[in-house]
Each structure stands twice: as C-alpha cells, then as structure tokens.
Amino acid sequence: MGNIKHSTTVTVPVEVAFGYIDNYRNVPSWMFGISRFDPVGDRDQGLGAVFDASIKLGPKTLHIRTEVTEHVPNERIAMTSIKGLESTVLVTLMPQGSAAAELTMEIGYKLPSGFAGKALGTIIDAVVGPGMRYTEHHLVREIEAFGASGAVGKSD
C-alpha cells in the first residue's frame, strides 16, 4: 500500500480550519484531481457520511465512493473508500496557539494486482509528489482566505 504524509501550518484557529475542511463543497477547490465530491444519501457531514468522487489522475478518471470513518470536531476527519480504488484519507489538526494550527494530511492507497495495477501505479507515482504539493498549497490558501473572510463558524 502506498502512503503519503505531509504536515504544514495554517495561520487560522483550529476551529476555522476544521470548519473549512469539514464542508464537502470545498473539497474540489483544494484536493488535487477531485472534480466531483457529492454526498450520497441524507448525510453530508460527520461519521457515516458517504460521498461519490471523481478523481483525475493523469489520463485516467477514477470514480470512488468514500465514507467518513472518523469525525472528531476540530481534530480529525478520516475517510475510507468503500467502492473503487482502495484508499484512505486522514486529515488531523493540532492547535498551535490560538491563531494557528498544524495540519497533517495522510493519504494511503492500494493498487489492484496485475497489469492494470502496474499501469495505474505508474500514473499515481508520477502525480503523487506534485499532487500533494498542489493540495497543500491550495488547502492552506483556501483555509486562510476562509478565515480572513470572517466566515468563522460558517461552512457555506
């Protein structure tokens, strides 16, 4: 299983960062390759919420269904795929004083076996580094703009 982990600091309170990350509507604006992230069913937030996502990786677009498997307000959100590419995403936040937070994102994935898995692995390997840098840059920028807009406590 491939695993990517990276940490950075955002200059907003942890509640603001979590409020932004916790809103599914924001995911396509910061997560590399995500063109669609739509709730399935009545829940669009919290433990047990399920989402359909489309992820463009190089020439391929993958479709996955993911479920929120951990949801601790102002601390962590974890999602695990339940259909499509086997993957996990974990976002954790740790306060750094009252006006900043350390944000850590960890992405894990397991490729299918055989030729298809090897081909997909080649594509993923080529986009992993740039994709993580893109995600980090855009997430920090979006969270800090969200905080600067006075949207504290609002997620829409």
Image (cartoon, rainbow, N blue to C red):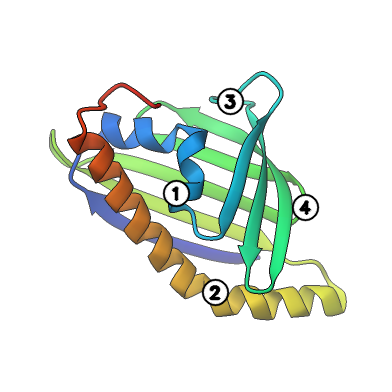
Which of marks 4 and 2 precedes in the sequence?
4
Give how far apart the Cα atoms at labels 1 and 3 are.
17 Å
Which mark is first along the chain, 3 or 1? Answer: 1
Label 2 to label 3: alpha-carbon separation = 29 Å
Q: Circle 4 sits in a helix, a strand or a loop, which is it? A: loop
Residue 29 in view here: yes
List the residue tagged with mark 1: 29
Residue furthest to the right in view is 114
Q: Which residue is mark 4?
A: 84
Inspect the image, locate mark 4, and give the three-letter code of the amino acid beneath it: Gly
Distance between the alpha carbons at the discs numbered 2 and 1: 18 Å
Would you call the spot at circle 4 few (<14 residues within 10 Å), some (14-19), or many (20 or more)?
few
Figure quadrant of residue 151: top left
- Under circle 1, the secondary element is helix
Can residue 13 be seen by looking at this rendering?
no
Q: Indicate the position of residue 11 as horizontal and vertical percent values.
A: 18, 45
The residue drawn where x is 55% and y is 49% is: 89
Residues at discs 2 and 4 in contact (Cβ within 8 Å): no
Element carrying mark 3: loop
Q: Amino acid at mark 2?
A: Val
Could you say which disc has been placed on residue 44 in the image?
3
Q: Nearer the viewer's eye, disc 1 or disc 4?
A: 1
Q: Residue at x 80, y 66 (%)?
A: 112
**Mark 2 or 3, nearer chain start:** 3
Q: Nearer the viewer, mark 1 or mark 3?
A: 1
Image depth: mark 3 or mark 4 in front = 3
Identify the amino acid type marked 1.
Answer: Ser
The answer for how far apart the CA atoms under marks 3 and 4 are is 20 Å
